[in-house]
């Protein structure tokens, strides 16, 4: 197991180098450049909700640590909901070697949304990201979201449905139906889940707003200061489309960044393994979206 040591990078060093490179004719751009330096120096908490992800969580946490080794302030919060496999042991092995990783075991778990909200509630950094812990959202993609942040952006969403992105089964080299089917058959994810996920996302875009391409992403980087916990409602992933829709209506700035969602290597999807389970999981997405849309319409009429 690797032991992580952060290089000492003085904040003033960035600014001194910047000032040395300026000439008198460019001094008017100094406020903008200082703002960019400030943005680069932001801190990050990554919230990883877990439930029996022992085969995936260790590799994901280590990969995030390596990708963000030069970031001064990084915290990885693993919020575990009473896993019965080796999830907690895998996280403790890493947490014993670095203070950047913290394991939180919830005695009374109340679903995925509750785990995310709990992680947000104890985070103290400038930015918070939450993402799946099954390896489907790789550390490379998290870094890609992080590099796209801007002082004028409030929310950055990892999107499977933008050019350059892809859902489970798609690879950079193959995106035809036969290859997708073959890739999923060789993984622990189902073809049915992929098809239903695409169909659900199309419905959500019609019901809510076509401005968002991936309403069921669940891969989100947000400025902590604009987060309102009550905007995240639900038990599983149905919080996501409503949260993004509400954020649009509030006038928050949202940017989607393409990424390829990878099939899980180990364990079983919590979304469901058969059509009945997938239907039960997907129904709250539909009812929540319909409720959010018509509640907003009624609010406008009554205002």
Image (cartoon, grey):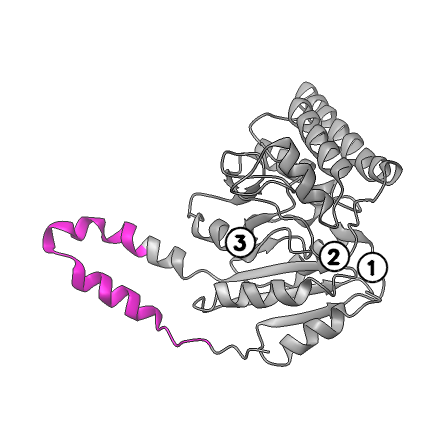
Front-lying residue, 49 or 272: 272
Q: Residue at x 55, y 38 (%)?
A: 174
Q: Which residue is mark 3?
A: 142
In the rendered structure, the answer to whether residue 106 lies left or right of residue 90 reads right
Q: Residue at x 71, y 37 (%)?
A: 194
Front tag of 1 and 3: 3
Secondary structure of residue under mark 3: helix
Left or right: 213, with 132 as reference point = left
Residue at the spot 78% in from the left edge and 46% down from the top edge: 236
Using a 10 Å C-alpha cutoff, classify the residue at mark 3 as few (fewer than 14 neighbours), some (14 to 19) or many (20 or more): many
Q: Which residue is the site of mark 1?
A: 109
- Helix or strand or loop: what does disc 1 sit on? loop
Question: Disc 3 versus disc 2: distance between alpha carbons?
Answer: 19 Å
Residue 115: give its label.
2
Residue 34 visible in the picture: yes
Dot 1 surroundings within 10 Å: few (below 14), some, or many (20 or more)?
Answer: some
* Disc nearer the start of the sequence (2/1): 1
The chief SS type of the magenta part is helix
The answer to whether residue 231 of the structure is visible from this angle is no
Where does the magenta region start and end? 6-34
Residue depth check, mark 3 versus mark 2: number of the one nearer the observer:
3
């Amino acid at each position: 197991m690797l032991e992580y040591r952060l290089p000492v990078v003085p904040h003033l060093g960035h600014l001194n180098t910047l000032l040395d490179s300026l000439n008198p004719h460019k001094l008017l751009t100094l406020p903008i450049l200082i703002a960019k330096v400030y943005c680069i120096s932001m801190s990050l908490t990554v919230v990883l909700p877990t439930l029996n992800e022992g085969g995936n969580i260790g590799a994901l946490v280590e990969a995030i640590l390596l990708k963000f080794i030069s970031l001064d302030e990084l915290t990885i919060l693993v919020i575990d909901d009473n896993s019965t496999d080796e999830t907690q042991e895998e996280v403790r092995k890493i947490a014993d070697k670095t203070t950047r990783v913290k394991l939180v075991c919830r005695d009374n778990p109340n679903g995925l949304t509750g785990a995310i909200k709990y992680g947000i509630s104890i985070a103290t950094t400038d930015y918070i990201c939450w993402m799946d812990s099954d390896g489907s959202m790789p550390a490379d993609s998290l870094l890609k979201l992080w590099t796209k942040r801007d002082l004028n952006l409030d929310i950055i969403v990892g999107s499977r449905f933008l050019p350059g992105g892809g859902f489970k089964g798609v690879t950079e080299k193959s995106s035809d139906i036969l290859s997708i089917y073959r890739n999923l058959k060789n993984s622990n994810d189902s073809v049915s889940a992929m098809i239903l996920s695409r169909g659900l996302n199309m419905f959500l875009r019609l019901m809510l707003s076509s401005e968002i391409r991936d309403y069921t992403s669940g891969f989100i980087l947000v400025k902590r200061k604009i987060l309102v916990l009550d905007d995240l409602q639900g038990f599983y992933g149905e919080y996501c489309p409503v949260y993004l829709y509400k954020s649009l209506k509030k006038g928050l700035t949202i940017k989607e960044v393409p990424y390829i969602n990878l099939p899980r290597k180990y364990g079983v999807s919590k979304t469901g393994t058969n059509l009945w389970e997938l239907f039960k999981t997907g129904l709250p997405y539909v009812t929540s979206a319909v409720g959010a849309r018509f509640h907003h319409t009624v609010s406008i009429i009554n205002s």
